[in-house]
C-alpha cells in the first residue's frame, strides 16, 4: 500500500465519519 492510496482511503473514511456525525447532530438539533 503506497502513501497515495493510504491518504485517499483516509480522506474517504474521514468524509464518511464527518458526514455521519453531521447528520446525527442535525437530527439532534431539529428533533
Image (tube, rainbow, N blue to C red):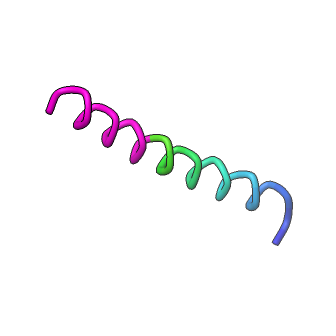
Residue 2 in the image: x percent, y percent? Answer: 85, 65
Say whether residue 30 is left or right of residue 10.
left
In the rendered structure, which segment of residues is drawn in magenta? 19-31
Report the residue at 39% width, 47% height from top. Answer: 20
Say whether residue 17 is left or right of residue 6.
left
Q: In the picture shown, does residue 1 fall above or below 21?
A: below
Callout count: 0
Residue 19 in the image: x percent, y percent? Answer: 41, 42
Q: In the picture shown, does residue 9 fall above or below 16?
A: below
Of 9 and 17, the residue lying toward us: 17
Q: Quadrant of the N terminus?
A: bottom right
Of 26 and 9, the residue lying toward us: 26
Report the residue at 57% width, 55% height from top. Answer: 13
Residue 6 falls in image quadrant:
bottom right
The residue furthest left is: 31
Report the residue at 58% width, 48% height from top. Answer: 14
Report the residue at 74% width, 60% height from top. Answer: 5
Say whether residue 9 is left or right of residue 19.
right
Of 27 and 5, the residue lying toward us: 27
Amino acid at each position: 500500500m503506497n502513501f497515495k492510496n493510504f491518504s485517499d482511503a483516509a480522506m474517504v473514511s474521514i468524509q464518511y465519519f464527518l458526514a455521519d456525525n453531521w447528520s446525527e447532530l442535525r437530527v439532534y438539533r431539529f428533533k
